Image (cartoon, helix red, strand yellow):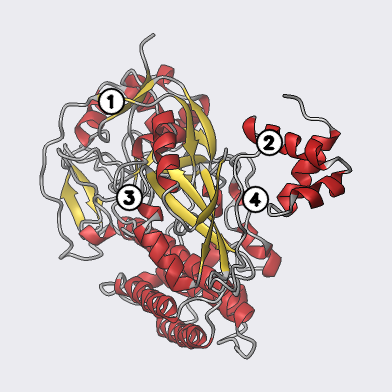
């Protein structure tokens, strides 16, 4: 059946008023009553009119909120889609459901009475739909649960507790350091402990208090210059390589600065409950957790330069001696895969947008490369074999006389750790190697480094647990029963650090956080033994220059699937 002008007029009229009488409809479309009725019956029989429905006045019905919900599934297979679509029909609050392309799989429009009603629907229905991996929502202006962008007081209270917990944890990392320890800068890439403590405080002062509190007064105007890192859009800063010359302010004054800002942030959270403030504080906390890791890796380098090889903490636990399994590979998934932040919880802008990536048939290593395997690489003369090295890498290792990982002794038997000099555990993952060394080892071993997309797809459904900062080791450990995707060492990938398709940096000065570094660096994945446990996730992207070694950086192998 093909539709003519009268059929379209009839359908337009019925969409506006499904209860219009045939007499009124015939007059509206300029047809006789009998001709109009025949056309309506034909449109019904041919399926152009599926059914008639009543549109409720949502406010009168006590359903004042429209919430648009994005749904992402674990797998995008036809059976999963069909099961989801069948189940969603049984949820009366769902008014519309659309299949999407891109970051999420479905968009739902649901109607609810209030925030509590939406939370009930979210917890009891939406998250229990078959195949659901993530749920993200936003509300229209007439929705009390989201439209005003006010946060529940319980959420704010929890955030205030989290804020103080993270802030206290940073200072706690310094408990065994002297004031003298916190001043030293051992190379341009590192920063003094005292500077880290002040900088992350400056971040909260500049981007939270000064932007959300109209009556806030700076602790010290000079600190804005001393402790800005690289945010040129808010002002100039003290040169990074000269941070170790800042004997003043003292460590005690930096701690006082932290308390001043902490008190102000807590007071602000008691006064305001808007979403923008919450988002900014959460960003600040994740920024602080990044600096917790940097604080530990930087002080490790500082202490390693001391001929006494002092421990940061002599009571630091030594990892249990385990046994690495024989190196093996698992088949990775190939084809079009979804990569990037899933849309639930916090993520940095460089993890977005979620997008499709093509993965070719490949295999990925079941564990990290061990110290014993890397020692074999050294003993085989690899550092003298130019065939194994990228051109830049060959230049670097010769110019800097590298012949072993950073912190290893010349006899390849011991290494410097945050617990002092210790015997190398041959079964633990090798660490403190550059991208150049990781790439050369992979070539020597008959493999390659994984792409960051291969890595993320393999890790996506693995719980992000492992040997992380809270384990207390602060050193990679052998794990025979773990694939070690999270913790121990950041894993070099073969992927340059570059923006995802459609990447948009944060607005304003915070747009300098990640985007401007997307050049000449390599992506690393998985976190390390000094990464906070609640900070890491499969989509997390960090990045370093290819010659970097002072971070806990290690190796996982991959290889192309046999053809």
Q: How many numbered marks are there?
A: 4
Position of residue 450 in the picture relative to residue 469 (left or right):
right
Task: Give the residue pinned by disc 4.
Answer: 504
Cα separation, mark 2 vs mark 1, equals: 60 Å
Q: Answer yes or no: do the residues labelled 3 and 4 have beta carbons within 8 Å? A: no
Residue toward you, 538 or 395: 538
- Whether pointer 4 and pointer 1 mark residues with C-beta atoms closer than 8 Å, the reply is no
Residue 502 image point, x, y percent: 64, 43
Q: Secondary structure at mark 1?
A: strand
Front-lying residue, 302 or 5: 5
- Residue assigned mark 1: 330
Residue linked to disc 3: 528
Q: Is residue 104 among the parts visible in the rendering?
A: no
- Report x, y in % for residue 355: 55, 38
Q: Quadrant of the C terminus?
A: top left
Q: Residue 176's x, y, as percent?
A: 25, 72
Question: Could you tell which of marks 3 and 4 lies nearer the N-terminus?
Answer: 4
Whichever of labels 4 and 1 marks the residue nearer the N terminus, that label is: 1
The CA distance from mark 4 to mark 1 is 35 Å
Instruction: Report the residue marked by disc 2.
Output: 41
Please indicate, yes or no, whether residue 77 appears anywhere in the rendered image: yes
Q: Residue furthest front?
A: 34
Q: Earlier in the sequence, mark 3 or mark 1?
A: 1
């Amino acid at each position: 059946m093909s539709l003519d002008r009268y059929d379209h007029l009839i359908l337009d009229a019925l969409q506006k008023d499904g209860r219009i009488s045939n007499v009124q409809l015939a007059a509206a479309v300029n047809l006789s009553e009998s001709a109009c009725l025949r056309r309506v019956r034909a449109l019904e029989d041919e399926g152009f009119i599926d059914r008639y429905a009543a549109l409720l006045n949502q406010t009168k019905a006590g359903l004042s909120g429209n919430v648009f919900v994005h749904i992402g599934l674990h797998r995008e297979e036809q059976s999963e889609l069909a099961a989801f679509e069948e189940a969603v029909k049984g949820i009366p609050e769902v008014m519309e459901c659309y299949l999407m392309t891109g970051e999420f799989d479905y968009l739902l429009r649901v109607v609810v009475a209030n925030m509590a009603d939406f939370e009930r629907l979210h917890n009891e229905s939406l998250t229990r739909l078959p195949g659901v991996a993530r749920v993200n929502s936003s509300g229209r202006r007439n929705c009390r649960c989201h439209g005003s962008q006010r946060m529940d007081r319980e959420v704010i209270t929890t955030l205030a507790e989290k804020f103080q917990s993270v802030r206290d944890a940073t200072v706690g990392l310094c408990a065994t350091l002297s004031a003298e320890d916190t001043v030293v800068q051992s190379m341009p890439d590192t920063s003094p402990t005292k500077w880290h403590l002040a900088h992350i405080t400056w971040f909260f002062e500049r981007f939270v208090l000064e932007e959300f509190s109209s009556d806030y007064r700076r602790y010290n105007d000079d600190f804005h210059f001393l402790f800005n890192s690289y945010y040129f859009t808010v002002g100039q800063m003290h040169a990074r390589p000269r941070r170790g010359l800042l004997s003043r302010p003292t460590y005690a004054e930096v701690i006082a600065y932290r308390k001043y800002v902490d008190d102000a942030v807590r007071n602000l959270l008691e006064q305001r409950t808007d979403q923008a403030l919450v988002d900014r504080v959460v960003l600040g906390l994740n920024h602080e957790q990044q600096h917790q890791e940097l604080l530990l890796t930087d002080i490790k380098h500082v202490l390693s330069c001391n001929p006494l090889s002092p421990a940061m903490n002599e009571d630091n636990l030594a990892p249990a001696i385990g046994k690495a399994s024989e190196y093996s590979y698992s088949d990775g998934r190939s084809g079009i895969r979804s990569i990037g932040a899933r849309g639930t919880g916090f993520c940095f802008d460089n993890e977005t947008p979620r997008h499709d990536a093509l993965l070719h048939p490949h295999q990925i290593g079941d564990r990290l490369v061990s110290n014993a395997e890397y020692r074999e690489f050294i003993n085989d003369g690899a550092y003298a074999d130019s065939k194994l090295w990228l051109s830049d890498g060959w230049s670097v290792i010769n110019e800097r006389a590298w012949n072993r990982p950073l912190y290893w002794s010349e006899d390849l038997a011991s290494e410097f750790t945050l617990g002092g000099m210790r015997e190398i555990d041959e079964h633990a993952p090798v660490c403190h190697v550059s991208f150049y060394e990781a790439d050369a080892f992979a070539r020597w071993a008959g493999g390659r480094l994984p792409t960051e997309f291969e890595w993320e797809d393999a890790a996506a459904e693995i719980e992000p647990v492992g040997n992380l900062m809270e384990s207390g080791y602060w050193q990679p450990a052998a794990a025979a029963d773990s694939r070690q995707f999270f913790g121990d060492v950041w894993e070099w990938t073969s992927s340059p650090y570059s923006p995802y398709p459609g990447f948009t940096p944060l607005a304003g000065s915070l747009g300098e956080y990640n985007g401007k570094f997307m050049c000449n660096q390599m992506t690393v994945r998985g976190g390390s033994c000094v990464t906070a446990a609640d900070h890491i996730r499969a989509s997390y992207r960090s990045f370093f220059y290819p010659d970097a070694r002072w971070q806990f950086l290690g190796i996982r192998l991959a290889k192309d699937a046999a053809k």
